[in-house]
């Protein structure tokens, strides 16, 4: 009962976990230094990807479609958050209508653009989280600070906000039942070469703040090369891998 109540509170509209990322660059502008660096990395990777996609006339058209969808998606999100359901529905229908009208080749490249951008953003987030942990360690703060959507955060909420007696929390925890569930490991859909490029992006982003001048230029040049190689690579496996290939690919 206690844990269910805390879970409902954490899932309630308007409740924002400390682990959640800002949803706009305006939020980043008011964030700490590492968060601003993260925003800059996401913009940098998005720009490099856009330049690579727009390298020819067909690619420029794809970038224009991607930007329209990004604009409409933000408009849709803002309308939902503001409770303007009619405006949100209208925007969604506009996106769906345009998607249905796209030629197969354009639709493929638009989907690839978004997929690559999200994967690159994940690489930037990975580097950002490492920097945040290092910053906490340097400040003498706990290495893993409490989050509202964690076990420690839930307990803090029950004690500090709900003023629940500790003995009741201990009794609720003691009554929990844990079961082990074994599932088949899914095949990694990304090719090994794609995963290695994502790791290289994260490594270059981590290296970049410690460079300047010529070294910074070389890091940026390699970063552009990796992003270009990602766009030119086939992302998916075209044949079923053997168990040995799956093991090598992680």
Image (spheres, rainbow, N blue to C red):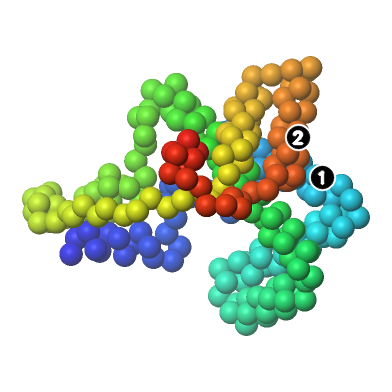
User: Which residue in the protein does label 1 denote?
Assistant: 51
The quarter of the picture where residue 177 lies is bottom left
Crowding at label 1, few (<14), some or many (≥20) Cα neighbours within 10 Å? some
Q: Secondary structure at mark 1?
A: helix
Q: Nearer the viewer, residue 214 or 245?
A: 245
Crowding at label 2, few (<14), some or many (≥20) Cα neighbours within 10 Å? many
Q: Position of residue 124 (x, y in %)?
A: 59, 39
Q: Residue at x 71, y 67 (%)?
A: 72
24 vs 12: above or below: above
Q: Residue at x 62, y 31 (%)?
A: 200
Q: Secondary structure at mark 2?
A: helix
Proximity of marks 2 and 1: CB atoms separated by less than 8 Å: yes
Q: Would you say residue 231 is visible in this rendering?
A: yes
User: Which residue in the protein does label 2 denote?
Assistant: 224
Q: Residue at x 49, y 31 (%)?
A: 130
Label 2 or label 1, whichever comes before in sequence order: 1
10 vs 206: above or below: below
Q: Position of residue 126 (x, y in %)?
A: 53, 37
Q: How far apart are labels 2 and 1 at the CA level?
A: 9 Å
Q: Nearer the viewer, residue 90 or 215?
A: 215
The quarter of the picture where residue 34 lies is top right
Q: Is residue 48 left or right of residue 162?
A: right
Q: Residue at x 33, y 62 (%)?
A: 9
């Amino acid at each position: 009962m206690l844990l269910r109540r805390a879970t409902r509170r954490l899932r309630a509209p308007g409740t924002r976990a400390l682990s959640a990322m800002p949803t706009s660059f305006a939020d980043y502008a008011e964030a700490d230094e590492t968060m601003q660096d993260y925003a800059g990395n996401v913009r940098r990777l998005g720009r490099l990807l856009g330049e690579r996609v727009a390298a020819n006339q067909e690619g420029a058209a794809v970038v224009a479609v991607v930007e329209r969808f990004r604009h409409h998606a933000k408009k849709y999100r803002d309308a939902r958050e503001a409770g303007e359901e009619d405006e949100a529905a209208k925007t969604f229908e506009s996106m769906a209508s345009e998607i249905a009208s796209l030629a197969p080749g354009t639709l493929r490249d638009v989907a690839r653009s978004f997929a690559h951008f999200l994967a690159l953003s994940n690489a930037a987030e990975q580097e950002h989280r490492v920097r945040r942990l290092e910053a906490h360690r340097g400040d003498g703060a706990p290495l893993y600070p409490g989050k509202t959507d964690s076990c420690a955060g839930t307990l803090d909420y029950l004690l500090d906000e709900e003023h629940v007696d500790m003995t009741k929390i201990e009794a609720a925890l003691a009554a929990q039942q844990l079961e082990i569930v074994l599932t088949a490991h899914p095949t990694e859909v990304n090719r090994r070469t794609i995963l290695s490029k994502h790791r290289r992006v994260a490594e270059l982003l981590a290296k970049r703040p410690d460079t300047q001048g010529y070294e910074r230029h070389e890091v940026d040049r390699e970063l552009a090369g990796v992003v270009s190689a990602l766009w030119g690579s086939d992302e998916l496996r075209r044949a079923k891998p053997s168990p040995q290939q799956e093991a090598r690919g992680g």
